[in-house]
């Protein structure tokens, strides 16, 4: 809201002084004033002096004052016609910045964390770790996330949700078919890699779980389902990256030709629950500006989600579902969780800032996942 300015006009015309006190002007205005009385022979101009508490100075294109009485102050009997030609200056975002936003590199942590946590649980349970299989699964997971990102941009473009989104891949390349082909090519290659890893481990249960995760991703955004528009995006995200993906990676990285059947322990189920929560928080904050409940209530949801995350963590520690080392290291990420809550509470009404909330959640997701994996591995090493 622009605050009014108190302006003082001092001028002289044919030896007479005319004063105007406390006249409010708007930016880029055309202002004409007239007073009753005898006419001056001509229109005259004066000097304007502005003062404002906010140090905001406004410009006036033209000021014509027609006075009808030489010696009277004209303000009490003035009429003003103001036409506002304001325009907003838009800051152009560089092409490099738009490309960086379109790539969404930090979001790929959602491919790394379930895999790493699942592998850490497998190491805790079996003492086994296959670097070759881990790298293959990581590459395949990145391809799957690429499919999700590209297809999401394409289908959001179709619905008009990304019509004015400059960093949309479709808007950047100027084509819909190119990103769509690249998306499904990534999906095909990624699923081939997951299939190879499942066959190599001799564990087909894991492939079934990963197929369920991919199906969740498809019905989330792809036609004819598009369940994200029905408010089901967060539950689908939780299931895909939590119980399905994390558990599948545990089975893949803990299985060998000799160890085909791995039990689903409370440790892997607890870890997958926490991974699912932090991943879902990223999705919620990614669509924060679209929250139908309102940004203020949305900020409350974020606060309670973070509180729930750490409450479940400590509850799992008390019932010994997770090792003590895991609880201690994950508790060290509390400042990051507090940072997420503070940022959302302070900026939930600022559309120009709130989009950064998802990146704060990515930090929490990555650090929380790394702490959990480190705690699981440490528990194995300390037990020796």
Image (tube, rainbow, N blue to C red):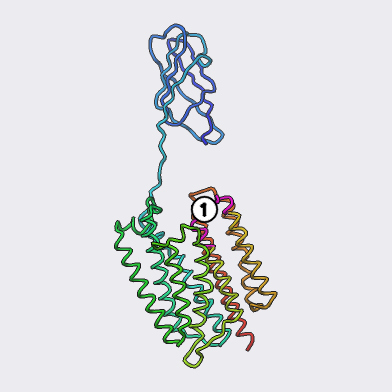
Q: In this view, does 193 lie above or below 297?
A: below
Q: Residue at x 46, y 72 (%)?
A: 213
SS type, badge 1: loop
**Viewer-proximal residue among 36 and 142:** 142
| Residue 314, quarter of picture | bottom right
Q: Does the magenta stretch include residue 282?
A: yes
- Give the tally of numbered discs: 1
Residue closest to the far front: 224
| Circle 1 residue | 291
Percent position (x, y) of residue 145? 42, 69
Majority secondary structure of magenta residues: helix
Q: Quadrant of residue 218?
A: bottom left
- Residue 360, image x and y in percent? 53, 60
Front-lying residue, 80 or 277: 277
Where in the figure is residue 241, as x and y percent of width and height?
50, 71
Residue shown at 63% from the left, 69% from the top? 332
Is 134 left or right of 297, judged from the image as shown? Answer: left
**In x, y percent, where is residue 228?**
46, 60
Which residue occupies the extreme top position in the image?
Answer: 38
Q: Which residue is drawn at 44% across and 25% down?
A: 82
Q: Which quadrant holds the C terminus?
A: bottom right
Q: State which region is magenta.
A: 281-298
């Amino acid at each position: 809201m622009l605050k009014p300015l108190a302006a003082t006009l001092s001028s002289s015309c044919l030896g007479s002084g005319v004063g105007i006190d406390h006249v409010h002007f708007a930016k880029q205005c055309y202002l004409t004033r007239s007073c009753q009385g005898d006419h001056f022979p001509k229109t005259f101009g004066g000097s304007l002096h502005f003062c404002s508490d906010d140090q905001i100075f406004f410009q006036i294109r033209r000021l014509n004052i027609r006075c009808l009485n030489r010696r009277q102050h004209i303000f009490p009997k003035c009429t003003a016609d103001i036409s506002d030609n304001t325009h907003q200056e838009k800051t152009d975002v560089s092409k490099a910045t738009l490309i960086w936003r379109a790539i969404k590199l930090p979001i790929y942590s959602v491919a790394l964390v379930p895999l790493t946590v699942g592998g850490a649980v497998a190491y805790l349970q079996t003492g086994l770790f296959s670097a070759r299989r881990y790298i293959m699964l990581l590459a395949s997971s990145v391809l799957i996330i690429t499919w999700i990102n590209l297809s999401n941009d394409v289908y959001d473009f179709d619905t008009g949700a990304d019509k004015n989104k400059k960093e949309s891949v479709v808007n950047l390349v100027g084509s819909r078919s190119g990103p769509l082909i690249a998306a499904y090519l990534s999906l095909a290659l990624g699923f081939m890699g997951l299939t190879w890893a499942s066959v190599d481990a001799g564990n087909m249960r894991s492939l079934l779980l990963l197929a369920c995760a991919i199906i969740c991703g498809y019905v989330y955004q792809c036609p004819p389902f598009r369940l994200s528009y029905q408010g089901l995006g967060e539950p689908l995200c939780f299931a895909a990256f939590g119980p399905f993906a994390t558990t599948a990676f545990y089975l893949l990285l803990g299985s060998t030709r000799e160890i085909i059947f791995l039990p689903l322990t409370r440790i892997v189920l607890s870890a997958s629950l926490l991974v699912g929560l932090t991943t879902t928080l990223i999705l919620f904050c990614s669509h924060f500006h679209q929250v139908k409940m309102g940004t203020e209530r949305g900020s409350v949801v974020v606060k309670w989600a973070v509180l729930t995350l750490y409450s479940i963590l400590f509850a799992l520690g008390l019932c010994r579902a997770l090792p003590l080392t895991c609880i201690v290291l994950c508790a060290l990420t509390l400042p990051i969780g507090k940072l997420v809550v503070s940022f959302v509470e302070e900026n939930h009404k600022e559309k120009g800032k709130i989009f950064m909330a998802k990146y704060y959640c990515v930090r929490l997701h990555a650090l929380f996942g790394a702490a959990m994996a480190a705690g699981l591995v440490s528990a194995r090493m300390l037990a020796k």
